[in-house]
Structures are given as structure tokens and as C-alpha cells.
Image: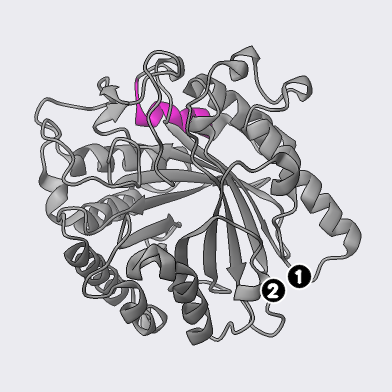
Amino acid sequence: MTATRPDAPGLTGTDTLGGHTTRQLLRLCEVVGLTAHDAEVYARTLTAMLGAAAARPLDLPPPNPTFLSDDHTPVEFSLSFVPGAAPTLRVLLEPGCAVGDLAQNGRLGLRAVRETAARWGFATDRLDELEDLFLPPSPEGPFALWCALELRPGGVPKVKVYLNPAANGRGHAAATVREALRRLGHHDAFAALPPHDRHLFFALDLGDWAEPRVKVYLAHQDLSAAEAGALSRTGGLPRAAEAERAEQNEEFFRIAAGQDEADGGGSETALAPAPAVRRPVQSCHAFTESASGLPSGFTLYVPVRDYAPHDGEALTRATVLLGRYGQDPAPLSAAVSALTDRGPEEGVGLVAYLALAHQQGQPPRVTTYLSSEAYAVRPPVGLLPAEPATVR
């Protein structure tokens, strides 16, 4: 499924996971206009949260398998675009990646989040209230805890925590999500979720958020564009606005998945063979108030790496989508150059997901998720047989 990774910018023969990913982070901070001081603060934070794994040489295998990325790098970057502003840089990581035991992984992750909270002075009570649900003594599932940092000017990030609904067994995932929503005061939220195949993540905003969100991520296998358009369940919109949002989601799906060639959503290479098993499309439903029982935010995620033969095609689609929403694609090109020296046509998976987010009172937001590729690069489609994909 993967091939040896070409040298990334700044890579040396004795490089480490922490050295490689922090150099990528420093270059990405420059792309989005963060100061050198802020970039250094965030680089140190990334190294600290990776723990013992940060010092692991890259000529060794990944510290442990993680489905956070295709090559098991426990770090992923993303750029979130809105019109008229520099994109927002985020980094997602698995703080407990140094250990293979899922229970210990979760404990290390929770400790890292609490240490981060102590450093920046925010509370973890909402997370603490859910600890027994998502971090049981003998957890199941593909992961325990992930943490995302939204890197803002000033050196203090916004923090998000991702938890595993299947921690008590996949058959109990729905009950776990329902109980977590109830504990956090969202008693009617579970009923507002659309039809889906499984629960993927339960997420919380921690720290300095104007409206902290509780988010439920769902998987939708073999979804059609029309079905993708109908997934949003947000309230407070006039009927015409709801219809417009559904059209936007459907168009986004078609372009991201390479199904909209006549409308400029890709090139002829979009029709090349795709993996036999694709990751599911994902939806995220964000709750900020409990009175209506309805989400205030919705995001659609397309795993573009399973719908494009190589990253050149994925970047073409991302550029089209950014143009649709009045956003400058130049930072995306700069970000790709900041992550790797390889050509986009030489692999697939550097651009992992494309997402379209809607939040009440805000313009639509396009996000591109970018892989670190610290360990390997997936060959372009057609060079090697496809392997079954994980849920992410």
C-alpha cells in the first residue's frame, strides 16, 4: 500500500519523528502568516504532546499503528479557508502514540490534554465528565484519544479532543454517544442525527471558544451526491436557505469525488481506477445550544485520496472548490511545498480529505487535510493493487 517516502524538505539521515513534523509545522506557520515566535511555541507544543515518540528515529518503523494517517504518522495538518483572510492552520495528533496498549494510550493522551490545559489555563471539566464512557479500563476500537490544536496568533491555540464511541464495543457506540450528549445537556441531540452506518468520533472544544461545540462524527458508506446533500440537520434556516445548503453540499461532493467533470471539477485523470474499497464519506454535527435539540453546524468530509488517482488531481479539485467559495488557493500550493519535495503525481494521500463546513452566522468554510507522510507515500492508483481501507 505504501512506498518509501522521498526526502521531505530538511530531512536528514538521523531525523526523528518530532524533528520532521515540527519542521513541517514551522514552514506551515510561515505559510499562514504566524510569527516566528508563535511558530516556535507551537513547534515545542507538538514535540511535548508527542512525548517519547518525538525522539524516535525515522529509520525505525512508526511507534505504533495509528489510523490517523495512511502511513501511521501520528500527526496530520489542515488548512481551513474563509474568504478575505489567511487560512487557519490546525494540527491533529495522537498524544499516546508511543505505547501500543490502548488503555495506556488513552491515559497518556488524557494526561497530555490536562497538562496543556494547565499551561494555558482552561478547564477540562466536560472531558472529565466523560472519562468513564470513552476511556474504560479495557477499551476497544481503533483509537483512544486524539487532540487537535487550532493555531492562532498569540501562541495560545484552541484545543479540540476526539474520543472513540466504540470504546465499550462497536455495538455500544450509539448508546455511548447518546449518554455523552445527555451528560453534557444535549438531551434531544441524538434524535437529530441523520441516518448513518456507524459513529466515528465524539469531539469537544476545550478552552477559549466563543461557542464551545460538542460534535458527533458519522460514517456514510457508498453515499450518493444527493444523499450527501441531504445530511445537514441544522436548525434556524429558512426553507430557501436549507435548499441552497443542500445544493452546495451536493456540488461539493460531486467535485471532491470527481463526479462533476463537465462542470470543471477535475481532469480526465479523475476517471482513472479507484481503490476497490473506499473510506466512507463523513459528516459532523456540531451542537452549541440545547434548547432546540438541533445542531448549529454541519461539515461534509470526502476522503479525496480514495476518489483520485494521485495528489495532482486532488489538488485540482481542491483549487476548484476554493474558487467556488471565493478563497485563494495559493496558500494550499505553498503548504504542499512546505510538506514535501515530491511531485503531486508521484503519490496519493498527501491531500487526505476535503471538507465543507457550515456554521450559523458564518460563511461556508473549505478545509484541506494534509498528511505528514513521515514514513511512506501511497503510490498513485493503478501501480499497486488496492488494499481494504480503514474507516478514516
Spatial CA distance of label 1 from label 2 is: 6 Å
Q: Quadrant of residue 69?
A: top left
Q: For this view, does 106 lie left or right of residue 350?
A: left
User: Residue shown at 71%/40% (left/top)?
Assistant: 225
Label for residue 235?
1
Question: What sort of colour scheme is used for the picture?
Answer: one colour
Is 126 one of the magenta-colored residues?
no
Label for residue 367?
none
What amino acid is at disc 1? Gly
Q: Earlier in the sequence, mark 1 or mark 2?
A: 1
Is 338 one of the magenta-colored residues?
yes
Question: Residue lying furthest front in this view?
Answer: 171
Give the main secondary structure of the magenta stretch.
Answer: helix
User: In the picture shown, does residue 89 fall above or below 267?
Assistant: below
What amino acid is at disc 2? Leu
Residue 222 visible (yes or no): yes
Q: Image quadrant for the N terminus? A: top left
Q: Which residue is mark 2?
A: 294
Do residues under tags 1 and 2 come within 8 Å of each other at their CB atoms?
yes
User: Residue shown at 32%/54% (left/top)?
Assistant: 142
Residue 325 visible (yes or no): no
User: In the picture shown, does residue 145 fall above or below 209?
Assistant: above
Question: Residue lying furthest right in this view?
Answer: 240
Q: What stretch of residues is rendered in magenta?
A: 332-341
